[in-house]
Amino acid sequence: MDDDWLEGTHDFIQVIFPNKEASKFVPDAKLLTDEDIHQFRSNNKLRSNLIKVIGRMFLFWEIGKDKPVWISKHNHNYLRITRTIIFLKAVGFADCNFILYDYLQEMFNLYPDEIGDTTFAYWKTAMFGKEI
């Protein structure tokens, strides 16, 4: 899907990055199960497809850019990113998660007012603390 679709469609993220906790925005979205986690950790085809999805989302979020367009106060992509971190942690994609988190930390250091302490705390908790 193109960037306009990804930006304007708000229920796809729960499908591609399910979590164990129900979504507040899409309550009927499938939850991540222990069997799903096992499959993502052991099935090479599934892992390969997930790498493509992660790559597409990194392009959409302009990971690596000096200031991506989504960095603004109260941007809905902040919630999407939190969900993604939780999912990647659960399914064992630590390398991708650290790339994402390191970039988010850099952006927070540069744009703390736009991102906000609360958002960064969610990202940090999703990355290092208990699952949200």
Image: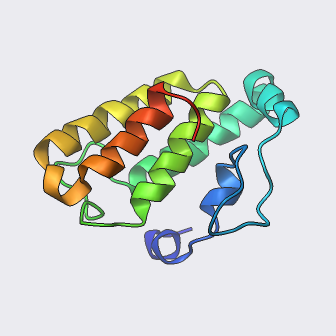
Quadrant hosting residue 87: top right
Quadrant hosting residue 29: bottom right
Q: Is 125 in front, or is 16?
A: 125
**Quarter the C terminus occupies:** top right
Q: Measured from the top left, where is residue 110 in percent x and y?
A: 12, 45
- Left/right placement of residue 122 relative to residue 15 reads left
Q: Is 124 in front, or is 50?
A: 124
In the image, residue 61 sits, relative to residue 105, either above or below, namely: below
Q: Is 99 in front, or is 22?
A: 22
How are the colours assigned in the image? rainbow
Residue located at (49% from left, 27% from top): 129
**Quarter the N terminus occupies:** bottom right
Give the residue at the far right of this rendering.
Answer: 35
Residue located at (42% from left, 66% from top): 76
- Left/right placement of residue 88 relative to residue 70 reads right
- Marks counted in the figure total 0
Q: Measured from the top left, where is residue 100 in percent x and y?
A: 39, 36
- Left/right placement of residue 102 relative to residue 94 reads left
Q: Measured from the top left, where is residue 46 in percent x and y?
A: 76, 36
- Left/right placement of residue 25 relative to residue 96 reads right
In the image, residue 50 sits, relative to residue 68, either above or below, namely: above
Q: Measured from the top left, where is residue 124 in percent x and y?
A: 39, 34
